[in-house]
Image (tube, grey):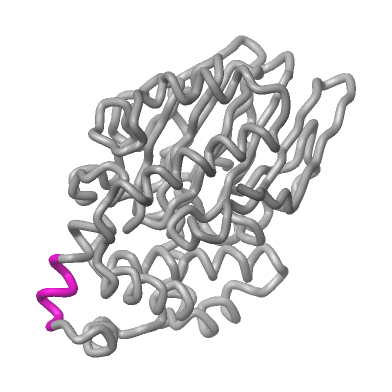
């Protein structure tokens, strides 16, 4: 199956080396399988990022070194492979400075078909995907080892194409109405009233809410909040003011935007925009969604890994 590499970036210097390679899956896998991203980092110090909620599910297949992930009021978890569905809260991820693997973005309804687990059970959690039932035909640890053994990203992406194509043919089609409702909500950046969304797909509001919780993880109103804030982060990063962003994204006022931003990103709009403009010390911020502002690089101590501490304090993750 043909794999299209859409962006490859790499660099090397006194602070280490890095490589990010992004590719689109084969068209027959889309829109369920959204993108692949190969990652290789070799740095002398730990690297830490804040990850904001996005309108996608993430499957991270690490080849060797683990990542440590924590959320507010939760104990940190250390994993080599990670599945994370849609969330409404920020997470901090950290590794020792060396990391290689592949990140797969899935639409939430496709993740539901892959794992078969009601997605509301996984909201605001990170789990080892091998702890979930799946239809890929073998443990994901075996798939990850096979990916790591291949000599280049293109062949790794091709193996993923073949694996996900087997999954696509082995599973019953998901709900077309859920997929259509999700697509409509994404295209509207969350600015679509729930009653109208239900009407568009021929369901009652109660039916829509039930199916969304099962196959998306979030109810339609919560999903719309995530998508709306995703657009707000993009506009702020482009240089729009908080007041203009609030108006364009349908918030009541700037205070409403700030409250939603702090709840789902862990910092204020101003803090987020300022942090995105800081010089990048070694490698660029590797956003999970192309063209979106999904991540912040956070300062890391010279002494090694540490707990979440100030990253979920009242002052936010960066101030």
On screen, residue 309 above or below 228: above
Q: In the drawing, does residue 9 fall left or right of residue 49?
A: right
On screen, residue 156 above or below 192: above
In front: 152, or 215?
152
Give the residue drawn at x 49%, y 48%: 105
On screen, residue 137 above or below 253: above
Bounds of the magenta segment: 204-210
Image quadrant of residue 136?
A: top left
The number of callouts visible is: 0
Position of residue 178 measured from the top left corner of the image (x, y, whole percent):
27, 70
Image quarter of the C terminus: top right
Position of residue 219 measured from the top left corner of the image (x, y, whole percent):
23, 65
Position of residue 244 measured from the top left corner of the image (x, y, whole percent):
60, 81
Q: Given the current orientation, which residue lies at the most extreme right position?
A: 13
Q: Main secondary structure of the magenta part?
A: helix
Q: In the drawing, does residue 302 fall left or right of residue 176?
A: right
Position of residue 258 measured from the top left corner of the image (x, y, whole percent):
46, 65
Q: Given the current orientation, which residue lies at the most extreme top position?
A: 303
Image quadrant of residue 175?
A: bottom left
Image quadrant of residue 262?
A: bottom left
In front: 242, or 20?
20
Give the residue drawn at x 39%, y 76%: 185
On screen, residue 273 above or below 206: above
Residue 41 appears in the picture as rendered: yes
Residue 271 appears in the picture as rendered: no
Q: Is residue 119 magenta?
A: no
In front: 297, or 25?
25
Give the residue drawn at x 35%, y 47%: 85
């Amino acid at each position: 199956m043909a794999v299209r590499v859409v962006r490859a970036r790499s660099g090397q210097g006194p602070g280490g080396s890095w490589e990010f390679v992004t590719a689109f899956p084969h068209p027959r896998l889309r829109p369920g399988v959204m993108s692949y991203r190969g990652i290789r980092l070799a740095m002398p110090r730990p690297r830490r990022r804040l990850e904001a909620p996005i309108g996608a599910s993430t499957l991270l297949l690490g080849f060797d070194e683990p990542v440590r992930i924590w959320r507010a009021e939760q104990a940190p978890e250390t994993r080599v492979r990670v599945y994370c569905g849609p969330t409404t809260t920020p997470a901090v991820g950290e590794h020792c400075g060396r990391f290689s693997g592949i990140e797969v973005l899935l639409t939430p309804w496709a993740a539901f078909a892959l794992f078969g687990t009601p997605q509301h059970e996984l909201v605001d959690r990170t789990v080892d995907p091998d702890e979930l039932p799946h239809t890929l035909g073998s443990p994901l640890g075996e798939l990850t080892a096979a990916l790591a053994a291949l000599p280049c990203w293109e062949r790794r992406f091709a193996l993923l194409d073949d694996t996900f194509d087997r999954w696509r043919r082995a599973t019953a089609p998901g709900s077309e109405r859920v997929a259509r409702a999700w697509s409509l909500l994404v295209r509207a950046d969350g600015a679509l009233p729930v009653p109208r969304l239900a009407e568009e797909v021929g369901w009652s509001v109660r039916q829509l809410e039930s199916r969304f919780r099962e196959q998306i993880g979030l109810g339609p109103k919560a999903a719309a909040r995530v998508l709306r804030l995703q657009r707000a982060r993009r506009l702020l990063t482009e240089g729009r003011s908080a007041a203009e962003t609030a108006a364009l994204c349908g918030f009541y006022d700037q205070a409403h935007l700030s409250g939603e931003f702090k709840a789902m990103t862990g910092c204020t709009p101003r803090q987020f925009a300022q942090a995105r403009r800081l010089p990048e010390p070694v490698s660029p911020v590797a956003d999970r969604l192309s063209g979106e502002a999904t991540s912040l690089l956070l300062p890391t101590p010279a002494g090694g890994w540490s707990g979440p501490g100030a990253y979920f304090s009242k002052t936010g993750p960066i101030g």
